[in-house]
Image (spheres, helix red, strand yellow):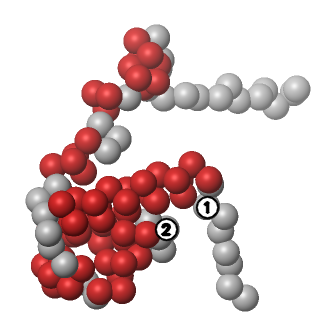
Amino acid sequence: MKKTSVIPIPVNKALKTLGQHIKEARIKRRLTLELIAERAGISYLTLRNVEKGSHTVSIGIYAKVLFALGLLDNLYEIANPDKDEVGKILESENLPKRVRYKKKKADE
């Protein structure tokens, strides 16, 4: 039996937006689907799925397409710790590096 997973709506929206941005970048550069697919080493249909923001396409494929478009530097900004506001707040609270639970005594 095949196991299916539900993609959260914000994740789906983010992928659709990424796909639209990739398509727009390709069109602005006046490059064809076939040329970018060839440069990225993927099939034409896979590139179409990337531009649609498909969640079934691996992040490695997205990275290859960004590289083919000359946009790979943008990938370095994903999950950049310097831009992680929540992480900075938590770090500033000097949270311990490890969390340990107290063991219950045997007589309890």
Q: Amino acid at mark 2?
A: His
Circles 1, 2 touching at the beta carbon (< 8 Å):
yes
Q: Position of residue 34 (x, y in %)?
A: 20, 85
Please report the residue visible at 48 percent of the width from the left and 29 percent of the height from the top.
98
Quarter of the picture containing the C terminus is top right
User: Which residue occupies the foreground of this view, 28 or 17?
Assistant: 28
- The secondary element bearing badge 1 is classed as loop
Q: Position of residue 50 (x, y in %)?
A: 37, 71
Quarter of the picture containing the N terminus is bottom right
Q: Looking at this rendering, what residue extends furthest in the top direction?
A: 93
Q: CA distance from mark 1 to mark 2?
A: 8 Å
Please report the residue visible at 52 percent of the width from the left and 53 percent of the height from the top.
13
Q: Which residue is mark 2?
A: 55
Mark nearer the N terminus (1 vs 2): 1
Q: Position of residue 49 (x, y in %)?
A: 41, 76
Q: Which residue is mark 1?
A: 7
Left or right of 25 in this view: 29: left
Q: Looking at this rendering, what residue extends furthest in the right direction?
A: 108
Left or right of 74 in this view: 105: right
Q: Indicate which disc residue 18 carries.
A: none
Q: Quadrant of residue 52?
A: bottom left
Q: Quadrant of residue 29?
A: bottom left
- The secondary element bearing badge 2 is classed as loop
User: Which residue occupies the foreground of this view, 63 or 104?
Assistant: 63
Above or below, 40 relative to 83: below
Instruction: Please tell me how crowded label 1 is: few (under 14), some (14-19), or many (20+) other residues with Cα within 10 Å.
Output: few
Q: Amino acid at mark 1?
A: Ile
Above or below, 40 relative to 9: below
Q: Is residue 41 visible?
A: no
User: Which residue occupies the foreground of this view, 30 or 18?
Assistant: 30
